[in-house]
Image: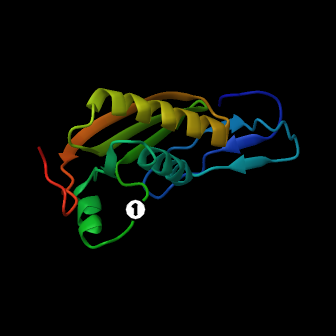
């Protein structure tokens, strides 16, 4: 398993969706007295908050039929549209998003990549190898009442 420096270990706990996926890296705190386990679902929550904070992002797109049904039923799923993989202490993220129609798609996607990378590295102290953004749709916002388009 990968090492990021001296001290305690950070281990990614297996999740129900991917029980075989786990990785260990040393915590940036340098504490030799123990280790911290971080579930990939917890990383997905960090990613979710980072993505939705970005200009031009309307929603996460469901990656599966079950996730789409859950959304229709009003269930909140912070992992919807997010796949997190950790191998040898390096994080890889794949996102499926819906953007606002009329926003510069590549600029928004690049901003999402940078924001997710920064937030995950800041929160976990683990390097992010890559962030892939898949734009699954565009949504047109309804105009504000009383305002007319030119």
- Closer to the camera, 122 or 146? 146
Quarter of the image where the N terminus is located: top right
Which residue is identified by label 1? 77
- Residue 15 relative to residue 25: left or right: left
Label 1 crowding class (10 Å Cα cut-off): few <14, some 14-19, many 20+? some
Residue 123: image location, x then y, percent: 64, 43
Q: Residue at x 30, y 27 (%)?
A: 106
In the image, taking residue 84 as reference, residue 67 lies left or right, namely left
Closer to the camera, 57 or 75?
57
Which residue is depicted at the point 66% across and 28% down?
2
**As drawn, 63 above or below 120:** below
Q: Is residue 143 above or below residue 85?
A: below
Q: Indicate the position of residue 14 as horizontal and vertical percent values.
A: 55, 51
Q: Quadrant of the C terminus?
A: top left
Q: Kindly identify the residue that appears in the image at 53 percent across and 33 percent down.
A: 117
Residue displayed at 35% across by 33% down: 108
Where on the picture, by quarter, is residue 5? Answer: top right
Q: Which residue is outermost to the bottom?
A: 73
Q: Nearer the viewer, residue 136 or 84?
A: 136
Residue 124 at x, y = what percent?
65, 41
């Amino acid at each position: 398993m990968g090492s990021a420096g001296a001290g305690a270990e950070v281990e990614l706990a297996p999740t129900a969706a991917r029980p075989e996926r786990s990785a260990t890296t040393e915590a940036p705190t340098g504490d030799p007295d123990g280790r911290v386990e971080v579930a990939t679902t917890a990383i997905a929550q960090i990613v979710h908050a980072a993505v939705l904070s970005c200009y031009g992002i309307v929603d996460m797109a469901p990656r599966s039929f079950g996730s789409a049904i859950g959304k229709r039923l009003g269930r909140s799923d912070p992992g919807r549209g997010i796949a997190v993989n950790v191998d040898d202490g390096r994080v890889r993220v794949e996102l499926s998003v819906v953007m606002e129609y009329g926003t510069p798609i590549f600029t928004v996607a690049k901003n999402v990549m940078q924001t997710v990378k920064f937030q995950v590295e800041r929160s976990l102290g683990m390097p992010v190898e890559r962030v892939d953004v898949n734009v699954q749709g565009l949504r047109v916002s309804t105009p504000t009442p009383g305002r007319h388009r030119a």
